[in-house]
Amino acid sequence: MTTTSEIKGSANGTSKVFEVNDHEQTNYAVQEKEYDRQLNLGYYRQMVAVRRMEEKSAEAYTQGKIGGFMHLYIGQEAVATGVNAALRPTDHLVTHYRDHGYAYGKGCSMAEILAELWGKSTGVSAGRGGSMHLARTKNHFWGGYAIVGGHLPLATGIAHSIKYRDLDEVVVCVMGEGSTNIGMFHESLNIAALWNLPIVYLVENNLFGMGTAVATHSSITEINQKSRAYGFPGDRFDGMDVWTVRDHVKTAIERAREGGGPTLLEAMTYRFRGHSMADAQLYRSKQDIEEWRSTRDPIETFAQKMLKYNIFTAADMEQVTADVEAEAEAAVKFAEESPFPTQESLYEGVFAPDDYVRKA
């Protein structure tokens, strides 16, 4: 059963309604037996942990403990959690620079992620990448990329390698809607369609490309329709609901795995913080942000559904909150006490023989 719901957004201060096709979004009572308590507690815990990790990161950034650019994932936690729930361990994930939630779901610990943000040697990328370059290659998480859309050809290349070697694997490539106007987006989709590659392109449409509303920068505001030019399906859905995200992504992944080729997914979502920590958010009103927070918070709405259908209890939620807080405090302590990379390690990981590198 497929229902239709609406997601409110705003463009240049004017409310706008986006229609999305939700996969049995409201039929939770029927689905209750399908999902056990531990599975859903896991989703809830992951979203709460990502939210708390981001809050700790924001605190540290304002204290000058984290440098460079940092893009928080607060408000969009259901997307990363749903995507990771749909992936097999052998599947591949390539993301944009708003990557903290994906890294956590793909096996990077909160301590390692925060240490990376602090620039410490114990970080996910040994303190060399920072917020936008988290990766865990042994888990097939190929990282966040700082160049808008620059990771799309790389993800497409991984999909080509999978097909060439006849592997039972799929790539999910995550991007913001602002990436869909650039040449690398269209080149990647064209090649993926031409070679029928096992890849799912997922657009996190949070309504603004930096500070520019979708209708201002894209002639097509239903981003998933851009796949039609290349002859493969697109799908738009509620990105604020973890079940909905998981089910739509899983369907696209299995289609790719069975030889059906690429899909362009569009998760309608909303970030509660600015594009980056430097964003004054003059392009949207505080009222819009508060409306989304009060009515569409993915963590709160998921918790209420779990309580309504007796999948888990308020006591379970309190335990998750306590566990996550302890994890976050320990992660901050780990990041602050870890050492910075040494001068001697400066050339580690450099793709150049020692003979061609002038050392200090």
Image: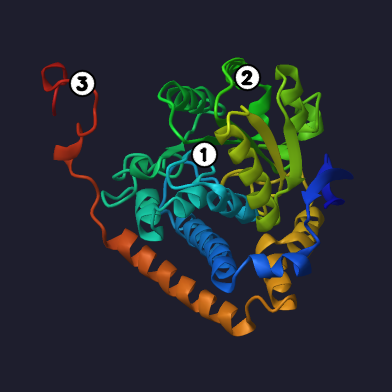
Mark 3 neighbour class, 10 Å CA radius: few under 14, some 14 to 19, many 20 or more: few
Q: Reading the chain from its start, which is encountered first: label 1 or label 2?
A: 1
Which numbered mark, 1 or 2, is in the foreground of this view? 2
Residue 173 shows up from this direction: yes
Q: Amino acid at mark 2?
A: Ala
Disc number for residue 352: 3
Q: Is residue 225 left or right of residue 161?
A: right
Q: Amino acid at mark 1?
A: Tyr
Residue 312 spot, x, y in % from top left? 63, 77
Residue 300 shows up from this direction: no
Would you identify the image quadrant in which residue 48 lies? bottom right
Q: Is residue 128 above or below residue 314?
A: above
Q: Is residue 22 above or below residue 172?
A: below
The residue where tag 1 is placed is: 97
| Quadrant including the C terminus | top left
Residue 210 spot, x, y in % from top left? 66, 37
Q: Is residue 223 left or right of residue 95?
A: right
Q: Which structural element holds mark 3?
A: loop
Q: Amino acid at mark 3?
A: Ala
Which numbered mark, 2 or 3, is in the foreground of this view? 2
Check the image and name the residue furthest to the bottom.
Answer: 315
Q: Reading the chain from its start, which is encountered first: label 3 or label 1?
A: 1
Q: Is residue 231 above or below residue 117?
A: above
Out of 208 and 44, give the one closest to the viewer.
44
Residue 290 spot, x, y in % from top left? 77, 60
The residue where tag 2 is placed is: 193
- Give the CA distance from mark 1 to mark 2: 25 Å
Q: Is residue 274 left or right of residue 335?
A: right
Out of 44 and 194, give the one closest to the viewer.
194
